[in-house]
Image (spheres, rainbow, N blue to C red):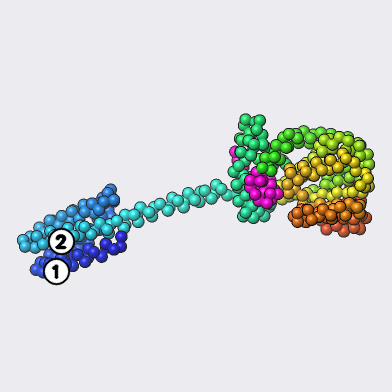
Amino acid sequence: MSDPAPNPSAEVAPTQASAPEPTKTTTAEAPTPAAAPTPAVVPSAEPAPPAPGAVPTPVAVTAPPAEPTPAPTGPPAPTPAPTAPPEITTTPATPVVPTPTTAEKPAPTPTTSVEKKTEEVVEEPQNALTKKFTDVEWKGVKELRSHIPEILEKAYPDRKDAKSTPTKLWGVTIDPNNPVDARVSVVLVKFLRARNLNTSAAQDMLIETLRWRDEMKVDEILKEEFPKDIFGSLGHVYGHDKGGRPVTYNLYGANQDLKAVFGDVPRFIRWRVQLMEKGIALLDFENVDQMVQVHDYEGVTLSSRDANSKNAASEATSIFQSHYPELLYKKFFINVPTILSWIFWAFKPLISAQTLAKMSVVGSGHRAISKELLPIIDAKELPKRYGGEAEAF
């Protein structure tokens, strides 16, 4: 586009040389072609931008035949006639440049406004927990969230409207029609973290969890009443740690009647799930999304464990690992018999570093226990039996 520009002037020069006599006439016509580009930019030239004919039209208008009239000197008239053709041929290059330029300038303006509107729509609602997400976690949350209708359809295959029907998980409503919610993001990121931010694996885990809760009828379990003389002393949700997290206590040796406790394994599992859900009910998923667990093994020995208790413990562990991801902040094992401590340390190499960091095996006695628990739980929130000041169970 820039090369043809100089040609017109180059050709005009020889033209002026070819007409030495009508120098005045030539100089009078020289500005005329110079003015030609100006009308070319006028909208009248834009109707036919592809062909150079758009420019010739204005040049033809220069029908400087009108100019020659004021200078009808006769001889010069033939001279300007040949001069016009070369100018007509080279001039098209000049208007072509402004034409696209004027067409491109308005385009960016609407694009920018559209982008701003898009950013406003996509803006994520935040809370204290979501503000701690990394960029990679946010990317995973958005991707996982985009599959919610599909996830619900797979989790509830017998429901025709599953893809568009809201569901609840840990008290948080997941609405496939409007999934952009800070609390929903907190729930989704737990499945991502549990699967090392693998979106596909997290999606499968979420589907299995929703399906399990539906088949297990967790909502009904929350309403179920269990014999207090059997389970009343085995578990408690009491107080909070210094970060506002609820604390759950499991006293495995509180009831020595193993047959009563583990004789009906499915019932024990339902009771254990209910205890877990009671602790989760205290999470708001805005400031607090994890809990602390204290597992008290006082009165427990290897000989006191039968086949049912082992099966129940194994099933409960599997359930919590598969369907309650990243809900545990810290887990303390207290009053652990020496033999059980050895077993724990023997399996230590098989435990992930992330999980191991949340676990603490503590000995017996108020001093040893309080030394581990008081840095996490305030004395007023910690039961006296564990070195605190609270009048609890």
- Say which residue appears at 63% left-offset and 46% top-offset: 200
Residue 316 sits above or below residue 131 on the image: above
Q: Of callouts 1 and 2, which one flags the residue occurring earlier in the amino acid sequence?
A: 1
Q: Quadrant of the N terminus?
A: bottom left
Q: Residues within 10 Å of mark 2 (few under 14, many from 20)?
A: many
Residue 310: which quarter of the image?
A: top right
User: Is 227 one of the magenta-colored residues?
Assistant: no
- Work out which residue is located at the far left of the displayed protein and give it: 74
Q: Secondary structure at mark 2?
A: helix
Residue that appears at 55% across and 47% down: 121
Q: Nearer the viewer, residue 365 or 23?
A: 365
Pick the residue in front: 378 or 13: 13
Identify the amino acid type marked 2.
Answer: Thr
Q: Residue at x 20, y 55 (%)?
A: 59
Q: What crowding class fits label 1: few (fewer than 14 Cα within 10 Å), some (14-19), or many (20 or more)? A: few
| Residue designated by label 2 | 83
- Which residue is the site of mark 1? 17
Left or right of 55 on screen, residue 252: right
Where residue 262 sits: x, y (%)? 88, 38
Q: CA distance from mark 1 to mark 2?
A: 11 Å
Question: Between 323 and 109, which is closer to the camera in this rendering?
Answer: 323
Query: Disc 1 marks which amino acid?
Result: Ala
**Picture quadrant of residue 308:** top right
Q: Which residues are magenta?
A: 177-203
Of the 4 image quadrants, the one containing the C terminus is top right
Chief SS of the magenta region = helix
